[in-house]
Amino acid sequence: MRRFLPFSPALALMTMGCESDARADCFAPGTELPTRRDTLTDQRLGAAARDFAEALFDGNLERAGQVLHGDPGLARRRIGAHYDMLSVALSTCRADAVDLVIRGGAPLDGVEDKGLPLRLALRAKDPAFAHRLLTAGANPNPAGNPSGPLRTAITLNSLGAVRMLLDFRADPNVMEATGNRPLHTALDMEHFRIAELLLERGADAWAIDSGGANLGTAATTKMLTESAEEAEAQRRLAERLKKLGWPQPVLSSREVRAAAASGNWPPAAARAAGAPAVPPSVLALIKANAVTAH
């Protein structure tokens, strides 16, 4: 039987502070995690689900295992609007808690099939959490948000996390509705070392999005950030353009959009060498935007 203690504002502040400190040590700054308070006050959860979540937050895995044994479906429960029990386990920064919930049958791609647990795990400072999920079968391109995990890793400028996802067969050419691909995300953020890795692992060097974002423009535009490593990687990307036969002088994004709209992107030599055509959906957006602009 659960015991409800009198509410103590001081105790609540102490608990919140300890939780915050633990998360600061475990996750990248800005990571949004399911909180103990929000989870245990979620009225959509039954008593058993709250008991299970509370045991996870407390690190009482013996109790968590007992509750889960009594109701195996608890590992698949939704928490709040987007979270789940696997997210709760991850938020505790305990590998054994994560393993327990995975063994219990938690949906590895989250209750919305958008890869939320993997995206949270990628934000953990210890890469073992993401590796655990991927090894267990988490999809690096989840159906509900195929580009989410790679975008998370790229945003963090984590070369290791991107490599891990690619090692588990993440698609380096996964495309969003606008045509944006991981390569464009990396280039836009001036994470040029990651852009190099993506190209080495099969990213389409000639790909553009609906705004005309492309490798050539990014590789030859003056950097806004200051990083010797990224500047050197950008220099290497600029050298790569010559090997690719990139048009010289390098076209601007606007010129690339115009070339695509007229059916001239990728250039004829690149198409002859096997470069894929601009996807029809992206081409339609480019043409629609051009009409709107006029």
Image (tube, rainbow, N blue to C red):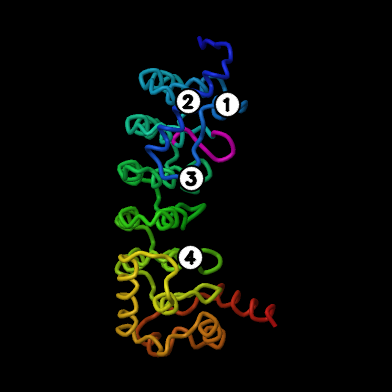
C-alpha distance separating marks 2 and 3? 23 Å
What amino acid type should be assigned to the residue bearing mark 2?
A: Ala
Circles 4, 1 touching at the beta carbon (< 8 Å): no
**Callout 1 environment at 10 Å: few (<14), some (14 to 19), or many (20+)?**
some
* Mark nearer the N terminus (4 vs 1): 1
Which numbered marker is on residue 165? none
What amino acid type should be assigned to the residue bearing mark 1?
A: Leu
**Callout 2 environment at 10 Å: few (<14), some (14 to 19), or many (20+)?**
many
* SS state under label 4: loop
Which residue lies under the disc numbered 2?
Answer: 53
Q: In the image shown, does 286 or 241 lie closer to the viewer?
A: 241
* Mark nearer the N terminus (2 vs 3): 3
Quadrant housing the C terminus: bottom right
What amino acid type should be assigned to the residue bearing mark 3?
A: Gly
* Mark nearer the N terminus (1 vs 2): 1
The residue shown at (36%, 19%) is 62
Circles 1, 2 touching at the beta carbon (< 8 Å): yes
Which residue lies under the disc numbered 4?
Answer: 175
Which residue lies under the disc numbered 3?
Answer: 30
Q: Nearer the viewer, mark 1 or mark 2?
A: 2
* Mark nearer the N terminus (1 vs 3): 3
